[in-house]
Amino acid sequence: MIVAPSSAVEGQTVTYSYHVTNTGQVALTNLVVTDDRLGVIALPSTNLAPGGATSALVTYTIVAADLPSPLVNTATMTGTPPFGPLLNATDAATVTFASQPALAVTKTVTPELGLW
């Protein structure tokens, strides 16, 4: 999983990229990617031949509740081989916040004329 940009501010939209590759030697079916913050990610293909790949993009707008930095998402992928247990893999992406709250105040004094 990749996120761009990796640094953002409140109100900015970031894009998460999910890329699933079947690195095994048998076909996989029923592929599901679940992001712990964004839920189930819709894949264009949920079945992959050996060496096959599929990708998805999801956008997200940074909100105040995501503060303070960093925002970490974890994606878990599961797939069903023709035999044996369910396969799974995980990956994470982090967004840090580019700006931090700040405050400044300036006070000046102007003497009033004629008060001597």
Image: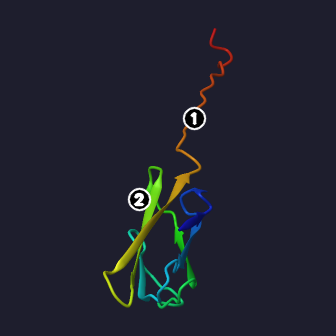
Front of the two marks 1 and 2: 2
Q: Is residue 65 above or below residue 16?
A: above
Q: Which residue is mark 2?
A: 65
Q: Residue furthest front?
A: 25
Under circle 2, the secondary element is: helix
Question: Mark 2: few, some, or many residues within 10 Å (few <14, many ≥20)?
Answer: few
Q: Quadrant of residue 32?
A: bottom left
Q: Which residue is mark 1?
A: 104
Residue drawn where x is 54% and y is 52% of the image: 97
Q: Residue furthest right?
A: 113
Q: Quadrant of residue 7?
A: bottom right
Real-space Cα separation, disc 1 to disc 2, in angstroms:
24 Å
Residue 35's spot in the image, x, y percent? 42, 72
Question: Mark 1: few, some, or many residues within 10 Å (few <14, many ≥20)?
Answer: few
Relative placement, left or right, of 78 versus 23 is: left
Residue 75's spot in the image, x, y percent? 43, 70
Residue 22's spot in the image, x, y percent? 51, 80
Query: Which mark is first along the chain, 2 or 1?
Result: 2
